Amino acid sequence: MAVHLEHFRYRARLSDDPFYPEDIQPRLQSILASLADIDFAHEKSIESIRHSLADEAQKRELIAVLRRRHQERRAPYVRELAELKSRIEAIFA
């Protein structure tokens, strides 16, 4: 019984100790939320264009512009996500 109790205390202490710096998880969640917002807005914009009265050539051109802007808006978040990934990998290396 004493061994089981000690094991439980040891596991409880381990679960309280973060494996990586405290700033990583909130920043990761923030980045992923921002990317989700950007992607959602992009999809809504594309759907609006697809259902518009513009001719197909105009729709294709507008969608191409939207896709470029979408990539530009996502780029800084994707870079930061890659940096976080590198930090996490360095911790477990």
Image (spheres, rainbow, N blue to C red):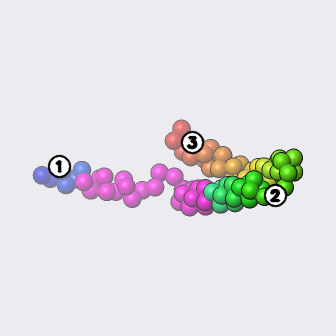
The answer to whether residue 30 is magenta is yes
Quadrant of the rendered image containing residue 29: bottom right
- Residue bearing mark 1: 3
- Residue bearing mark 3: 89
Quadrant of the rendered image containing residue 73: bottom right
Q: CA distance from mark 1 to mark 2?
A: 74 Å
In the image, which is nearer the foreground, mark 3 or mark 2? 2
Within 10 Å of the Cα at label 3, are there few (<14), some (14-19), or many (20+) other Cα atoms? few
Lower position in the chain sequence, tag 3 or tag 2: 2
Within 10 Å of the Cα at label 1, are there few (<14), some (14-19), or many (20+) other Cα atoms? few
| Residue 76 visible to an observer of this rendering | no
The answer to whether residue 47 is magenta is no
Expressed as whole percent of the image width and height from the top left, the position of residue 46 reads: 74, 54
Q: Amino acid at mark 2?
A: Leu
Expressed as whole percent of the image width and height from the top left, the position of residue 38 reads: 69, 58
Question: In the rendered structure, are the residues bearing label 1 and label 2 in contact, judged by CB atoms less than 8 Å apart?
Answer: no
Label 2, secondary structure: give it.
loop
Residue at the image position 83 percent from the left and 48 percent from the top? 56
User: Magenta region, mostly helix, strand or loop?
Assistant: helix
Q: Which residues are magenta?
A: 8-33
- Residue bearing mark 2: 53
